């Protein structure tokens, strides 16, 4: 009989120190960060890192981000630290940004996916900071935590401790509860390992913020970018059929639903620009027309709606402006493979 089950503990001095102890012992923990919750392990311990891949069902060649307490600590994981990294670290760390740099020789292949680069992030969440500091205390070698988002491979990222527990029901996992992640989508990944810095994954740190700090436009993604598992077309997949429709197309579709003669399945729509007319078998959720609100709400909403088993979830396509890059990116992945013809 299985008795393994996750345990959620409010983050305080005691639980933070217990978490650091567990990490030193090669165990996994659920770690709150300002972007999403992570499934963290000692980045220098092969057996511990292997547990992450096993727990998530994640392919072995997908690299992990190493979390550290400060930019100074990050440098210990890099073979070289370009001026662009310095400028971006000064501007956005601690915070929702990951830098890809050339790896130091000691970085495990299992962490980098065998690549010659490593992803580094200094989270700002006070609990993540406290755990990193407790974990690094009394250690003479570089201390870092490998932490992917704490979800099963292919599922949406968790933004609360409860989400983490739901993702790993048979793991004896200590999950620190640090409240709902205030950003709500994963960090912006910026590759500064090559000649021209590039954004590999959009997030709360906007491309325009990066360009302002660097004082020049960013390179185009040429398609030869290193592997980013979040870059798989359908990486963030809810179970419910989910699709995105332009505003006018959505209004048309709603009229068609209303006029339909046959019995209709129950549907859910999420909008930003209008309130659909009430009708039977349609639930409407209107979010403020603001990218940060959508980033904050999106994953928790997809997760909640997925459990309510709607026939279809239809999302009003957000504007195609740079402010909405992260939301559009995640929505494209969540809706990959669904077309309006399926309605
Ligand atoms: O906000 C975040 O970044 C969260 C929190 C927990 O910090 N973490 C996260 O980890 O989203 P994960 O593993 O779900 O996504 C990390 C992404 C993956 O798509 C991975 O391929 C990419 O970072 N990545 C890691 N190292 C890389 C490298 N050396 N080169 C290119 N991409 C890398
Ligand atoms: Mg992930």
Image (spheres, rainbow, N blue to C red):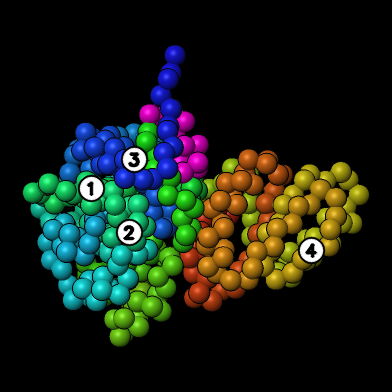
* Residue 78 placement, left or right of 334: left
Residue 162 magenta-highlighted: yes
Task: Tell me the tag on residue 15.
Answer: 3
Q: Residue furthest top?
A: 1
Please provide percent x and percent y for residue 61: 29, 45
Depth-wise, is mark 4 or mark 1 nearer the camera? 1
Residue plotted at (21% across, 33% down): 25
Q: Between residues 197 and 273, which one lies in front from this camera angle?
A: 273
* Measured Cα–Cα span from mark 4 to mark 2: 39 Å
Image quadrant assignment for residue 54: top left
Residue plotted at (19% across, 60% down): 74
Mark 2 vs ligand 1: CB below 8 Å: yes
Q: Earlier in the sequence, mark 2 or mark 1?
A: 2
Point out the image quarter for the N terminus. Answer: top left
Please provide percent x and percent y for residue 239: 59, 42
Task: Determine which residue is flagged by label 4.
Answer: 276
Magenta span of residues: 161-172
Please provide percent x and percent y for residue 20: 25, 41
Please provide percent x and percent y for residue 127: 35, 52
Task: Determine which residue is flagged by label 1.
Answer: 134
Q: Residues within 10 Å of mark 1 (few under 14, many from 20)?
A: some
Task: Tell me the tag on residue 123.
Answer: 2
Contact? badges 4 and 1 (CB < 8 Å)? no
Image quadrant assignment for residue 13: top left
In the rendered image, the vertical position of residue 321 relative to residue 184, given as above or below: below
Mark 3 vs ligand 1: CB below 8 Å: no
* Residue 137 placement, left or right of 163: left
């Amino acid at each position: 009989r299985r008795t393994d089950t996750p345990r959620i503990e409010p983050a305080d001095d005691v639980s933070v120190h217990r978490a650091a102890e567990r990490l030193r012992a090669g165990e996994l923990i659920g770690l709150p960060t300002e972007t999403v919750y992570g499934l963290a392990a000692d980045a220098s311990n092969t057996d511990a890192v292997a547990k992450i891949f096993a727990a998530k069902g994640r392919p072995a060649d997908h690299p992990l981000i190493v979390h550290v307490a400060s930019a100074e600590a990050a440098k210990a994981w890099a073979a070289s630290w370009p001026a662009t990294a310095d400028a971006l670290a000064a501007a956005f760390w601690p915070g929702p940004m990951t830098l890809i740099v050339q790896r130091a020789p000691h970085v495990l292949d299992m962490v980098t996916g065998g690549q010659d680069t490593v992803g580094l992030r200094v989270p700002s969440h006070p609990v993540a900071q406290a755990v990193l500091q407790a974990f690094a205390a009394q250690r003479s070698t570089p201390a870092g935590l490998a932490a992917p988002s704490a979800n099963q491979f292919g599922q949406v990222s968790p933004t609360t401790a409860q989400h983490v527990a739901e993702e790993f029901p048979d793991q004896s996992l200590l999950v620190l509860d640090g409240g709902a992640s205030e950003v709500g989508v994963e960090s912006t990944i910026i590759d500064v390992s090559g000649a021209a810095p590039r954004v590999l994954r959009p997030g709360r740190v906007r491309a325009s913020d990066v360009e302002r700090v660097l004082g020049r436009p960013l390179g185009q993604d040429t398609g030869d970018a290193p592997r980013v598992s979040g870059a798989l077309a359908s990486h963030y997949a809810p179970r419910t059929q989910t699709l995105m429709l332009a505003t006018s197309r959505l209004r048309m579709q709603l009229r068609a639903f209303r006029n339909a003669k046959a019995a209709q399945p129950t549907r859910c729509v999420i909008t930003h620009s209008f309130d659909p007319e009430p009708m039977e078998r349609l639930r409407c959720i209107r979010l403020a027309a603001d990218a940060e609100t959508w980033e904050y709400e999106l994953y928790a909403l997809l997760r909640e709606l997925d459990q309510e088993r709607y026939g279809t979830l239809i999302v009003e396509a957000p504007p195609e402006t740079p402010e909405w890059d992260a939301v559009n990116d995640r929505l494209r992945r969540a809706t990959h493979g669904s077309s309006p013809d399926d309605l």
